[in-house]
Amino acid sequence: MRELKSYVVYACPKCHLIQMSRCDRKTRKCFKCSAIVKLNWSVIKVLFSSDSAREAVEAVKRLKIGESGLDSRRIFVKSSSLRENE
Ligand SMILES: [Zn+2]
């Protein structure tokens, strides 16, 4: 098993909400779908880990922005329909 730092950023296996936890916790309740997530780091995909809570929070923000970036097609449609209305 790979070595983890104090704070781990992961996605809920059920609703894929990106969140963070201390790596020494065993379970955590997802604040979106209320699933009790077993923090088994050999099963859950670790997106980021750091000894700094601040860095972990930044990583959560970055990952969330990255996720919405995947939806760029919708943003494109939205902006092109705006242009048509002008
Ligand atoms: Zn969830």
Image: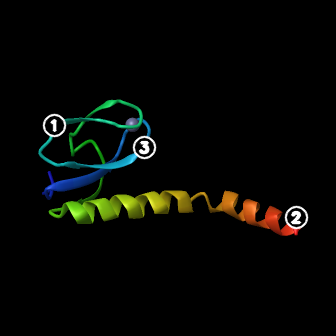
Q: Which residue is mark 1?
A: 26
Q: Quadrant of residue 41?
A: top left
Q: Of callouts 2 and 3, which one flags the residue occurring earlier in the amino acid sequence?
A: 3
The answer to whether 85 appears left or right of 74 in the picture is right
Give how far apart the Cα atoms at labels 3 and 1 are: 19 Å
Q: Which residue is mark 2?
A: 85
| Residue type at the position of mark 1 | Lys
The answer to whether mark 3 is within 8 Å of ligand 1 is yes
The answer to whether 81 appears left or right of 50 in the picture is right
Q: Nearer the viewer, residue 35 or 31?
A: 31
Residue 19 point in image, percent of width and height? 33, 49
Question: Is 24 placed above or below 85 here?
Answer: above
Q: Which residue is mark 3?
A: 16
Give how far apart the Cα atoms at labels 1 and 2 are: 53 Å
The mark closer to the camera, 1 or 2, is 2
Q: Quadrant of residue 73?
A: bottom right
